[in-house]
């Protein structure tokens, strides 16, 4: 910006100097005309103001608002017009925090957040508030403390999106009067005391263990109900019980090929066919002797 302004000023001074030298050469008997050209050149060199594409400025004439200067070269009257500080119209971010702030359930927390905002009315941002950037930061910080005081810790941890919207609405209601629009607020971190964090961790662990035990008990109930139904089937159908016994015998010897001692009562409950099947399974699973299977 300064480089552009210096270029315009230098061009005006060079042109004024060339005109002054020409008048001094062709009209040496009129020094007042040369002085007038020099004065006009100096005045015009102080007149241009360069406004960048992303900037706006306010022109005051004799202390009163005249107009908002758009991007480009603006010409002012030195000594009469005053150009205020230029306003950046781009989106900006401001970080703010609240330390040792009590929540609704009296838990001290440290909260870090970031505010995204943009100036939408350059006139109001300059004329309505002094140092609007610092004022926005203070407004955001006080609003954050107020929201924390109305919110419980559980919601602060689990519903950050809702808190972001609430903060954005509250802060924008204040800054809109200054020509500033809040686009979004994002809570970056919520820190709680370490002792409370440990207690919450133990509570969550206990709740998970409780849930696991409840699920295990429900599973036991389901297993017991199914076993009761199976017992009813075996009670009224002896063949089903025999088939089950045969299957258990076969499953126990088919993989390891171990010798199983069967009580005589169990043998009596089985018929000859069942014993034959069990013996066949045992022979197939047993290792062969002398390289031959029996």
Image (cartoon, rainbow, N blue to C red):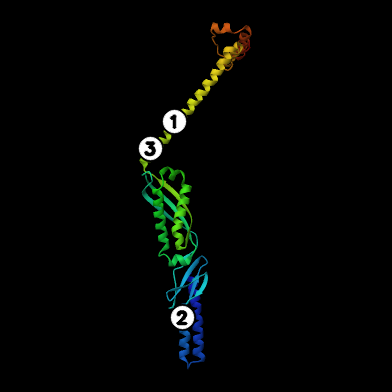
Residue in front for this viewpoint, 22 or 109: 109
Q: Which residue is mark 2?
A: 43
What is the x, y in percent for residue 165? 48, 51
| Residue depicted at 49% across the width and 28% down the height | 215
Sequence-first tag of 3 and 2: 2
Spatial CA span between label 3 and label 1: 16 Å
What is the x, y in percent for residue 169? 47, 54
- Does the image show residue 290? no
How packed mark 3 is, by other alpha carbons closer than 10 Å (few <14, some 14-19, many 20 or more), is few
Residue in front for this viewpoint, 231 or 257: 231
Vertical relation: 218 (above or below) 205: above
Sequence-first tag of 3 and 1: 3
What is the x, y in percent for residue 226? 55, 20
The label number, if any, that marks residue 39 in the structure image: none
Q: Is residue 294 left or right of residue 162?
A: right
The label number, if any, that marks residue 199 in the structure image: 3
Vertical relation: 65 (above or below) 120: below
Q: Which residue is mark 1?
A: 210
| Residue depicted at 47% across the width and 28% down the height | 214
How packed mark 2 is, by other alpha carbons closer than 10 Å (few <14, some 14-19, many 20 or more), is some
Q: Secondary structure at mark 3?
A: helix
Spatial CA span between label 2 and label 1: 85 Å
Among all residues in the image, which is located at the extreme bottom?
29
Discs 3/2, front: 3
Discs 3/1, front: 1
Spatial CA span between label 3 and label 2: 74 Å
How packed mark 1 is, by other alpha carbons closer than 10 Å (few <14, some 14-19, many 20 or more), is few
- Does the image show residue 176? yes
Discs 2/1, front: 1
């Amino acid at each position: 910006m300064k480089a552009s302004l210096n270029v315009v000023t230098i061009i005006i001074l060079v042109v004024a100097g060339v005109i002054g030298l020409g008048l001094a050469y062709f009209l040496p008997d009129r020094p007042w005309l040369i002085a007038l050209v020099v004065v006009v050149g100096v005045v015009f060199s102080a007149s241009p103001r360069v406004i960048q594409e992303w900037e706006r400025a306010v022109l005051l004439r004799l202390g009163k608002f005249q107009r908002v200067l758009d991007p480009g070269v603006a010409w002012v009257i030195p000594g009469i017009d005053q150009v205020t500080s230029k306003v950046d119209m781009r989106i900006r971010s401001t970080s703010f925090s609240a330390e040792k702030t009590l929540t609704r359930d009296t838990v001290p927390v440290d909260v870090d957040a970031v505010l995204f905002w943009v100036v939408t009315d350059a006139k109001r941002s300059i004329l309505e508030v002094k140092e609007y950037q610092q004022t926005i930061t203070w407004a955001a910080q006080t609003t954050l403390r107020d929201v924390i005081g109305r919110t419980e810790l559980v919601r602060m941890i689990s519903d950050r999106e809702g808190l972001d919207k609430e903060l954005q609405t509250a802060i924008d209601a204040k800054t809109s009067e200054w020509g500033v629009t809040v686009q979004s607020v994002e809570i970056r971190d919520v820190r709680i005391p370490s002792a409370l964090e440990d207690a919450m961790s133990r509570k969550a662990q206990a709740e998970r263990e409780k849930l696991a035990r409840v699920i295990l008990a429900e599973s036991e109930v389901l297993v017991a109900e199914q076993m009761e139904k199976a017992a009813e089937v075996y009670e009224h159908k002896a063949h089903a019980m025999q088939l089950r016994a045969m299957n258990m015998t076969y499953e126990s010897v088919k993989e390891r090929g171990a010798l199983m001692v069967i009580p005589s009562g169990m043998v009596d409950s089985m018929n000859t066919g069942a014993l034959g099947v069990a013996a066949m399974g045992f022979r197939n699973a047993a290792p062969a002797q002398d390289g031959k299977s029996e």
